Image (cartoon, rainbow, N blue to C red):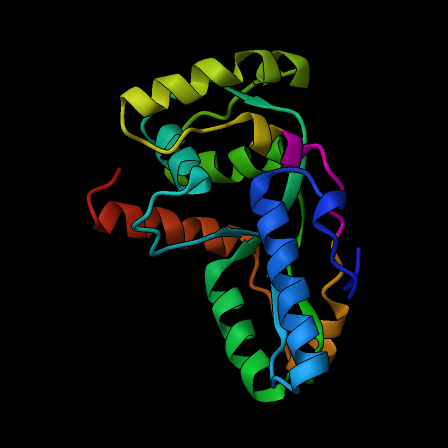
């Protein structure tokens, strides 16, 4: 998928996606009608050090590091380093063309590859069990309830499972060409995130 300029909330799934579509349309309308100097960036799945809010991906790393995760699910997504996204946003402010959109992504990664990288970085045995998506969807409400009781970010939800089976083949060619956007290896992102979690006594 590459950049689009026609955002319709009725064509996307979930309140989060609908709110983003409505906002993007509002910004582009202001650019067109009021000459607003603005660009839009679209990051993929953000991961990396400094996550004090404890998002799904940080919770995944913590669960693997603590040995509480024994299985993963099929599917995958495009995961990008938060530091690359931050630099991409700054470059978009300076180099972006008014009224343009830029995808700040990295590459598609299967969930199994992601958990293997985390296992390597945390020196844990690799997870062998890969659950079918139908089973994960069936147990998602229980997962959400379990993590709500523990007051932690749920490892997976009905919506996150939908995301892991959606098209995540994003192109960041435009951002690289016009913004000088760059990606660091995912292995480096995982390693640095694990080190940050250790330094902050989170694992």
Magenta highlight: main SS: loop
- Which residue shows up at 46% across the image and 48% down it? 190
Instruction: Give x and y (percent) for residue 29.
Output: 69, 73
Residue situated in front as seen by the camera: 83 or 125: 83
Question: Which residue is pictured at 74% across the width and 44% down the height?
Answer: 10
Q: Residue furthest front?
A: 33
- Residue 26 pos. (x, y %): 63, 66
- Vertical position of residue 161 compared to residue 180: above or below: above
Say whether residue 143 is magenta. no
Q: Nearer the viewer, residue 82 or 142?
A: 142
Of 158 and 30, the residue lying toward us: 30
Residues shaded magenta:
162-169
Q: Quadrant of the C terminus?
A: top left
Q: Is residue 167 magenta?
A: yes
- Above or below, 147 against 84 in this view is above
Number of numbered discs present? 0
Q: Is residue 69 visible?
A: no
Left or right of residue 26, residue 85 in this image: left
Left or right: 154 in relation to 91: left
Residue 21 visible within the image? yes
Residue 201 lies, in percent from the top left, at: 19, 43
Quarter of the N terminus within the rendering = bottom right
Residue 156 versus residue 198 in the image, above or below: above
Residue at point 55%, 23% (across, down): 72
Give the quarter of the image for residue 62: top left
Residue at 61 percent across and 86 percent down: it is 37
């Amino acid at each position: 998928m590459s950049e689009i300029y026609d955002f319709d909330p009725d064509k996307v799934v979930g309140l989060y996606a609908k709110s983003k579509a409505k906002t993007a349309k509002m910004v582009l309308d202001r650019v067109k009608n009021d000459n607003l100097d603005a660009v839009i960036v679209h990051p993929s799945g953000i991961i990396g050090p400094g996550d004090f809010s404890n998002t799904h991906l940080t919770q995944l790393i913590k669960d693997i590091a603590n040995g509480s995760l024994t299985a993963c699910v099929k599917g995958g997504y495009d995961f990008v380093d938060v530091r690359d996204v931050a630099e991409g946003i700054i470059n978009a402010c300076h180099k972006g063309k008014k009224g343009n959109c830029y995808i700040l992504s990295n590459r598609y990664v299967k969930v199994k590859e992601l958990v293997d990288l985390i296992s390597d970085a945390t020196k844990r045995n690799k997870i062998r069990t890969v659950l079918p998506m139908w089973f994960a969807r069936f147990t998602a409400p229980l997962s959400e309830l379990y993590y709500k009781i523990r007051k932690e970010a749920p490892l997976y939800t009905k919506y996150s499972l939908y995301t892991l089976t959606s098209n995540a083949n994003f192109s960041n060619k435009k951002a690289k060409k016009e913004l000088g956007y760059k990606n660091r290896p995912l292995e480096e992102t995982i390693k640095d995130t694990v080190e940050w979690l250790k330094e902050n006594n989170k694992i």
